[in-house]
Image (cartoon, grey):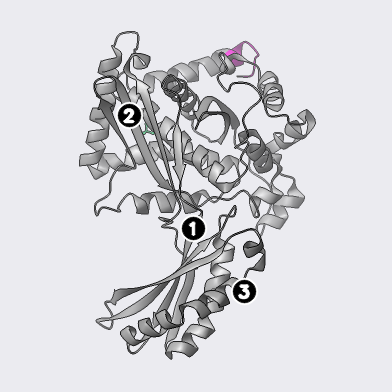
Amino acid sequence: MKQSNEPSRIPGWHKLSLDERRNRTAALRNLDQTTLRDAMTHGGLHLDDAKLMIENVIGTYALPFAVAPNFTINGRDVLVPMVVEEASVVAAAGNAARLIREGGGFTAQVTPPVMIGQIQLFAKDVHKATEQIKEHRKELLRVAREADPMLIRFGGGPLDLETRLVPDDDSEGQFLVLHLHVDVRDAMGANAVNTMCERLRGPLEKLTGGRVGLCILSNLADQRLVTAACSVPVEALTMENRSGAEVAQGIVMASLFAEMDPYRAATHNKGIMNGVDAVMLATGNDWRAVEAGAHAYATKKGGYAPLATWRLMEGKSLVGRLTLPMAVGIIGGTTKVHPGARAALEILGAESATDLGMVATCAGLASNMAALRALSTEGIQRGHMRLHERSRKLAREGQKP
Ligand code: MEV
């Protein structure tokens, strides 16, 4: 990940004018000011490009594009681009990142960018078919590899082929599901994985005498995970009328609430996705894929659980941890055609999909901490109304917030 030219800790960032923030962003990231201005105007997307992205286009649709300061991830300072329609999300993430910075910032760990493609196979004898697939594993992987020579050239490609048996309620039998594991490098991977799975249809039917059903990527990307963690000194959490220890305790209690109650866990996870989705939108990524993966992953132990949890360590620091599947890309698709998405990736300094996944997960953890801190102290409405009032005041004074 590229380090920003100066620390991302920028006191008074929210008090600068829009132009000042834009120019400062360009300077911090060595971006051309005109290119950045063009990418940030009218949603950054020209109608001609919009027409190439989807069908039946009649216009474009803009949302606010913001930059959250204060993030430091694995010792590097990062500016976080966020696109979101909800007030407070950006300010809350930046504030939480400032507190987390007091404890050295975020640490983030990633697995290699491996996606799973599923191939459904109906065979008379599923056990015999499993054996045949195991015996011909190498040949089948070769067929998959030949489907995407470019990916192989970039160091990725199919890695493994697993078989699973799934109960078939209709026939009271079972069908086979093959999982093709593919290292997709810096792509989100859907195209590469789907092509490979479809390429295997013929060879699998010939090999087993069975019938292939669906061939499609799984959004439960549990082989492509990011874990973000942070440790905030309790004193850093001190508020006007509350000790840091009280605030930390409140956050832990809120975490436990979500760990015990799926109704609360859903809202807890929504708060995480406030940060994650805002980065996904800014960078032109498929946020529905990441949403689907996150919520499916939240059930990995059976019941629906919170994706981030918080604990107090020796009464001294508040430790938070979030693991998310991160099916994201920095090449191809919207990231290629949308100037706003390209600018977001430049602002972020992402050199790989892995970098982007780490930043989005840290934004999720920051958003979660901010929400729990507010909910367990003054409630969220007060801060929300404060920001609302500030915007109205600036508008009255003829200044753009
Ligand atoms: C609102 O967008 C998000 C929260 O509801 C998250 C939470 O309750 O943890 C505040």
Report the amino acid beneath label 2. Val
Q: Relative to residue 251, is residue 46 drawn left or right?
A: right
User: Would you place residue 299 above or below residue 367 in this image?
Assistant: below
In the image, the segment drawn in magenta is 394-400
Q: Which mark is residue 330?
A: none
Q: Which residue is mark 3?
A: 146
**Tags 1 and 3 in contact by the CB under 8 Å rule?**
no
Report the amino acid beneath label 3. Glu
Give the secondary structure at mark 3: helix
User: Would you place residue 385 above or below residue 153 in this image?
Assistant: above
**Tags 1 and 2 in contact by the CB under 8 Å rule?**
no
Is residue 399 covered in magenta?
yes
Is residue 146 covered in magenta?
no
Q: Nearer the viewer, residue 316 or 82?
A: 316
**Whole-percent x and y of residue 164?**
34, 72
Task: Using a 10 Å C-alpha cutoff, classify the residue at mark 3 as few (fewer than 14 neighbours), some (14 to 19) or many (20 or more).
Answer: some
Give the secondary structure at mark 1: strand
Q: Which residue is mark 2?
A: 319
Q: Relative to residue 94, is residue 264 drawn left or right?
A: left
Q: Which mark is residue 114?
A: 1
Task: Using a 10 Å C-alpha cutoff, classify the residue at mark 2 as few (fewer than 14 neighbours), some (14 to 19) or many (20 or more).
Answer: many
Tell me the distance, in whole angstroms, between the alpha carbons under discs 1 and 3: 18 Å
Task: Using a 10 Å C-alpha cutoff, classify the residue at mark 1 as few (fewer than 14 neighbours), some (14 to 19) or many (20 or more).
Answer: many
